[in-house]
Image (tube, rainbow, N blue to C red):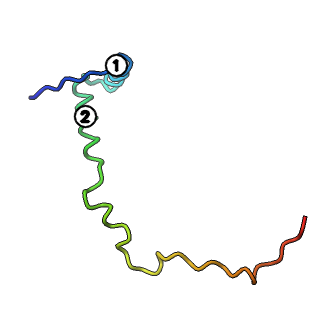
Amino acid sequence: MPQLSLYIDQSTLQQVEKAAKSARMSVSRWVRSRLHSSFEHSWPDTYFDLFGSIRDTSFDIPDSPVSETDTPRESL
């Protein structure tokens, strides 16, 4: 299996080691699982092409209410 070297600060390393220990995993396995899961939860390439693609009047912004039919407000 290929290897990867990372340069991280001591504080980050301590956090990684603590997280790996609480997950009962080796540091390598914990980092690998975190990297793998970050790739799984990305949006598909064409996801943002969907915006505005639905042509349905229920998605239109309703007209603003007419202010003449509003109840007059009291002066304070």
Report the residue marked by disc 1: 9
Q: Nearer the viewer, mark 2 or mark 1?
A: 1
Q: Amino acid at mark 1?
A: Asp
Picture quadrant where residue 55 is located: bottom left
Rendered location of residue 19, percent (x, y): 35, 25
Q: Secondary structure at mark 1?
A: loop
Residue sitting nearer the eye, 41 or 64: 64
User: Residue visible at 69% across and 82% down?
Assistant: 66
User: Residue visible at 66% across and 79% down?
Assistant: 65
User: Residue visible at 30% across and 24% down?
Assistant: 24
- Judge whether 49 appears above or below 66 on screen: above
| Residue neighbourhood size for the residue with mark 2, other residues' Cα within 10 Å, grouped as few (<14), some (14–19), many (≥20) | few
* 53 left or right of 76 in image: left
Residue sitting nearer the eye, 3 or 49: 49
Figure quadrant of the C terminus: bottom right
Q: Earlier in the sequence, mark 2 or mark 1?
A: 1
* 23 left or right of 57 in image: left
Q: Amino acid at mark 2?
A: Ser
Which mark, by number, is residue 33?
Answer: 2
User: Residue visible at 25% across and 36% down?
Assistant: 35
- Judge whether 59 appears above or below 43 on screen: below
CA gap, disc 2 and disc 1 = 20 Å
The mark total stands at 2
Q: Secondary structure at mark 2?
A: helix
Figure quadrant of the N terminus: top left
Rendered location of residue 4, percent (x, y): 17, 26
Which mark, by number, is residue 62?
Answer: none
| Residue neighbourhood size for the residue with mark 1, other residues' Cα within 10 Å, grouped as few (<14), some (14–19), many (≥20) | few
- Judge whether 41 appears above or below 4 on screen: below
